[in-house]
Image (cartoon, grey):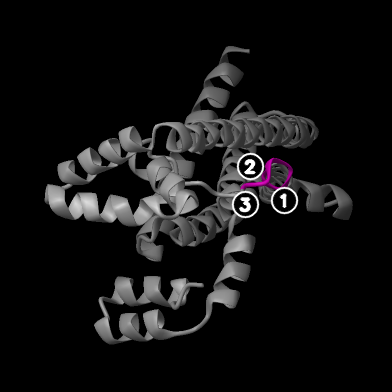
Amino acid sequence: MLSRKLDEARDAFRRRDAEASAAAHGARGAAEERHRSASGRYVKSLIYGGLDGIVTTFAVVAGVAGASLSASVVLILGFANLIADGLSMAIGDFLSTKAENEYNRAERAREEWEVEHFPEGEKRELVELYVEKGMSEDDARAVCEAFSRNPKAWVSVMMVEELGIVEERSSPLGNAVATFLSFSIFGFVPLLAYVAARILGTGGSLSFPLATALTALTLFVLGALKVRITGRGWLWSGVEMLLVGGAAAAAAFGIGRLLGGIA
């Protein structure tokens, strides 16, 4: 059971606050951290699914607007993108997570077999790995002997040190659902102004500027939320995502304008 609160430890590191770091490592909050880590497994799928959804959908909206096509075309292409790309991303996330889990299980089974049948060879490999990291050979051997008394921990260490595999219990279905929902919800933002104009029966002249403003705001917020994964400053992360998404939208708008002129 970990004697630290991970969120507090990360916050202390960002602030370079040694006292707060010591307090976080002395806290008995393992049960709370396990709960947060379980819910946090889908943070990556939620954030990147949302970012992809809003950028690709707004690219469609910008391209259609650049070609001066009707609002009906925006809605048709926009919702087609939401469903088709959302499902594509969800299926891709499902298959990639499933394949990664299967690969990790196969590698762990191999390591367990090698530890059982060739323990001395596995010890030698681990000693060599620790020596490469700067440990003395005597210290490395002492560490390996300690691990060898707990085969489960020994295999887990070999997975990380030898293969670079950090095992996480990721749910393929959970990741897929999180990706699809995030893609669909955030991808709907650029279409919101057009849907509102259609429902209210108002003119659509302000739909594209409003869609642009809503998309810019959402991109910034999602970029700022990305710090949950990257640990960077929220302001720069938000601005960076706004610039990247804006560049993609500007390119789509320009292409739409060019092709609209040709037509």
Instruction: Residue at 45% x, 32% y: name it.
Output: 117
Rounded to the nearest whole Å, what is the CA distance between mark 1 and mark 2? 8 Å
Mark 3 in CB contact with mark 1 (< 8 angstroms): no
The amino acid type, in three-letter code, at marker 3 is Leu
Q: Is residue 51 above or below residue 105?
A: below
Of residues 11 and 262, the one drawn nearer to the viewer in this rendering: 11
Which of the numbered marks, if any, corresponds to residue 53? 2
Mark 1 in CB contact with mark 2 (< 8 angstroms): yes
Instruction: Residue at 41% x, 64% y: name it.
Output: 234
Marked residue nearer the N-terminal end (1 or 2): 2
Residue tagged 1: 185
Residue tagged 3: 46
**Helix, strand or loop at disc 1?**
helix
Please report the bounds of the magenta region as a residue range.
170-175
Q: Is residue 62 left or right of residue 250?
A: right
Instruction: Residue at 14% x, 47% y: name it.
Output: 137
Mark 2 in CB contact with mark 3 (< 8 angstroms): no
The amino acid type, in three-letter code, at marker 1 is Ile
Res. 125 visible in picture: yes
